[in-house]
Image (spheres, rainbow, N blue to C red):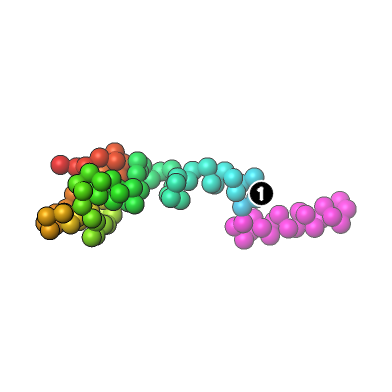
Amino acid sequence: MTMNRWTLALTMVLALAAGVPAPGDAQASDRGRGRGGESAFDDRAITLDEAVAQAERRYNARAIRAEEKRSGDRIEYRIRLLGADGRVFEVTIDAGAGRRRD
């Protein structure tokens, strides 16, 4: 091997030992990512921000608190809203289905 090949081989070995992805691997690792950077194994139909916007539109209210709750592999969003009449109420949206849970 020439000196350049040795240098390249040594660089690759050191990069692998350090956990740096190879140039072709960087794209493969990004393929499993969704809109918000969550992995493909995270079965969300919508993000928390999208759920808040959806709830505000549907109930003509303003979100005053929003949180993500996990139960095993299921994710739901709990959104507390302030209605136009001053009433505070909470809705729960299933992140996987993107719909309100009753």
Q: Position of residue 12 (x, y in %)?
A: 71, 54
Q: Residue at x 18, y 57 (%)?
A: 82
Closer to the camera in the image, 91 or 69: 91
Closer to the camera in the image, 48 or 20: 48
Q: Position of residue 52 (x, y in %)?
A: 28, 51
Q: Main secondary structure of the magenta part?
A: helix
Q: Residue at x 29, y 38 (%)?
A: 97
30 to the left or right of 35: right
Quadrant in which the C terminus appears: top left
Q: Quadrant of residue 9?
A: bottom right
Q: Residue at x 59, y 45 (%)?
A: 27
100 to the left or right of 27: left
42 to the left or right of 21: left
User: Going by the picture, which residue comes out furthest to the front?
Assistant: 84
Q: Residue at x 45, y 45 (%)?
A: 34
Closer to the camera in the image, 92 or 57: 57
Element carrying mark 1? helix
Closer to the camera in the image, 83 or 8: 83
- Does residue 32 appear anywhere in the picture? yes
Magenta stretch, residue numbers: 1-20
- Mark 1, residue position: 23
User: Going by the picture, which residue comes out furthest to the right?
Assistant: 2
Q: What amino acid is found at the position of numbered circle 1 in the picture?
A: Pro
